[in-house]
Amino acid sequence: MRDILPPESGRWRRFTSVFAEVVEAAGYQQVISPLLEDLGVFVRIGDATDVVTKEMYDFVDKGERHVALRPEMTASVCRAYAQHRPTPPWKVFYSGPNFRYEKPQRGRYRQFDQVGIEVLGVDDPHLDVEVIALAWEFYRRLGLRRVVLVVNSLGEPDDRARYVEALRRHFEAAGDGLGAQSRETLQKNPLRVLDSKRPADQDVIAGAPAIADFYSDEAAEHFATVRAGLDRLGIEYVVEPKLVRGLDYYRRTIFEIQGGTLDSAQNALGGGGRYDGLVEALGGPSTPGIGFALGVDRTLLACDDEGVFAAVAPPLDAFLVDITGGQEAAAITAELRAAGLRSDRAFDNRSMKAQMKLANRSGAAHAVIVGDAELASGTVLVKPLRTDGEQVGIARDDLIRHLLGSTSND
Ligand code: AMP
């Protein structure tokens, strides 16, 4: 678990506000869910997944409830839908931290943030296109270019079930060709063996049957409509028949956005797909759902690697240097802030030299200096700090106008 310090923390906040702008423009509204849920909420997302069986931060609270820190947010959103029964379609977005007890490494942490959306109550493939397009648009807005959109369809539940049986036969026939860990996964969920990144498993995985051969007409048509919709929007994608997603509840459309620069086990920056059964499993009505979650930590690493969406400290417009005791700095910074000018000041009644040093270090555009003479004559000295311009003395009443003028000229 990491501290996110300034100026990096400012970048995190901008990240979520850009995300909110993109999805609010499409009619999504924010849902804020608790970090802690009844353990049962997450067990519903799949008891054959590492996320649930090995990585959960769960404990018994003082009221003897078995609870867990959320490992993802889809289950919480579906629980909220089942509980509050909003009118469908329910289009929501979220952002915040999740917790998984994983082995920490670059791009993989025990506390990590996600932003995401979910839509409950719509079964139309055109919605799949909207959801994928929003994720894609967000990555474009960040400035990322070396990312790849990968899509697949897991078919209808029946198609998927027949496919899973064919996979089971294929992997069982491979015997020791699969590593011990994958043989264990095979017992629980053959589909998830395809997710293995272990080099030793790759030959057997390459020879595995493809889901496309198991699609019903309905599933094939749904997927064709989604692809045609992406084509229509000019969104480039790769169809990856072996793409499966970590959690068990997906069907039909699934997708991932992969970065080119992280280790392959961490190259999924975000992903999502269509699911059903989850709202019902959580006590609600049978409800189709689709959504995605994008990892903030990993996406920002990809931004670093591409040199885009950099962390920048918000620049100050003015730094107050008050050598008359500090009251003037308090009054002037308050006036400037009220006028929308970012301003900071020195404290502790330091010397002129010490305060000027702080002003220079602050990165402010101007130092605004008040000494005894200025105080007596109702003036201030304004010294540009980022350009070679001359220091000028102006009436205190003109300060805001002066600074606003130089801000717009900068
Ligand atoms: P998932 O919920 O597993 O589909 O993950 C969606 C996205 O969340 C991934 O593509 C990652 O960007 C991010 N993510 C998942 N687990 C972690 C983790 N342990 N550390 C950092 N990011 C993660």
Image (spheres, rainbow, N blue to C red):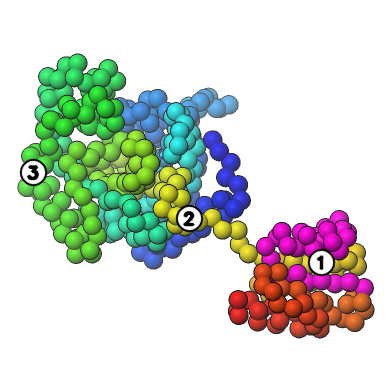
Which residues are the magenta region?
A: 344-372
Label 1 residue SS = strand
| Amino acid type, label 2 | Thr
338 or 69: nearer the viewer? 338
| Amino acid type, label 3 | Ser
| Amino acid type, label 1 | Val
- Which image quadrant for residue 386? bottom right
- Which image quadrant for residue 164? top left
What residue would you read off at disc 3? 216
Residue at 57%, 45% in the rendered image? 4
Gap in angstroms between the C-alphas marked 3 and 2: 39 Å
Label at residue 321? 1
Which is in the foreground here, disc 2 or disc 1?
A: 1
Vertical comparison of 327 with 101: above or below:
below
What residue would you read off at disc 2? 16
Residue at 33%, 37% in the rendered image? 264
Within 10 Å of disc 1 (Cα), the crowding (few <14, some 14-19, many 20+) is: many
